[in-house]
Image (cartoon, rainbow, N blue to C red):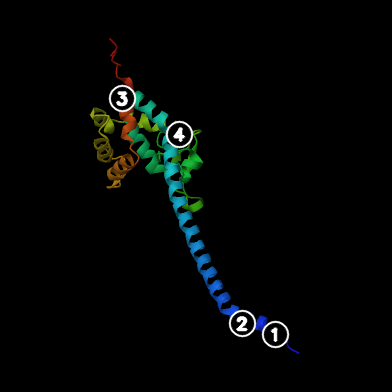
Amino acid sequence: MVHKSDTLLFFKTLSSQPKLKVRLLMMKRFYFLFIISIALLNVSALRSGSQLSTNQYIDRYRDIALFNQQEYGIPASITLAQGIHESASGTSKMARKANNHFGIKCIGWSGSSYYTGSGKRRGGCYRAYDIAEDSFCDHARILKSQSRYAFLFKLDITDYKAWAKGLKKAGYAGDPKYPAKLIKVIEDYNLNQIVLDAIADTLPKMDLSL
């Protein structure tokens, strides 16, 4: 014998099926949107991580760049921009393995060496340093000591555009877009402000007290 309650339960079960399908569909859509959101967040994190990496690079090597500015007359903005560009903010293999942030080759070098490639594909010889700061100082000494760069030191230390173009003119890099790349890095990260701040700090302070 079929009870009325059983019949009602049966019809309730049937009537609930379409709702269940709708709920499942909504859950699938929600899950899909959730996955898309996570993917977008990951992309954003990667981008911000890259930005943070460069900012960390600037913070880490700012002092040595300013030391070279004071000691050799090379704008800290130029030094940092070259390091950022040539070492990919310290993440390139040469920077990680040899602490060489400027691609300085072994010419006239008796210290440790780093070779690109391996075996029969062994490439160029580059200087290897104990610490990255040594490559910054070596880079400054090379620019200061070689006559082809002498005209650069007649430029205003705040004129980063002239310095960038001058490096290309002196044969520092073969890439015709090298000056534009340095200028972009300097402007993207406001590196010239580091130079301006350093100059301001060396100016005599005026006593405005009465």
Under tag 1, what secondary structure?
helix
Query: Contact (CB < 8 A) between labels 4 and 2?
Result: no
Q: Is residue 209 visible?
A: yes
Instruction: State the residue position of label 3.
Output: 199
Mark 1–mark 2 distance (CA, rounded to whole Å): 16 Å
The correct choice, above or below, for 56 with respect to 145 in the image is: below
Instruction: State the residue position of label 2.
Output: 14
- Quadrant of the image occupied by residue 16: bottom right
Where does the C terminus fall, quadrant-wise? top left
Query: From the viewer's perspective, is 208 left or right of 86?
Result: left
Dot 3, crowdedness within 10 Å: few (<14), some or many (≥20)?
A: few
Q: Nearer the viewer, mark 2 or mark 3?
A: 2
Instruction: State the residue position of label 4.
Output: 60
Residue at the location (45% across, 45% down)?
92
Work out which residue is located at the far right of the displayed protein and give it. Answer: 1
Instruction: State the residue position of label 1.
Output: 4
Please tell me which of labels 2 and 3 falls first in the chain: 2
Q: Nearer the viewer, mark 4 or mark 2?
A: 2
The correct choice, above or below, for 14 with respect to 182 in the image is: below
Mark 3–mark 4 distance (CA, rounded to whole Å): 20 Å
Residue at the location (36% across, 34% down)?
79
- Residue 81, disc: none
Mark 4–mark 2 distance (CA, rounded to whole Å): 68 Å
Judge by depth and name the residue closer to the eye, 161 or 108: 161
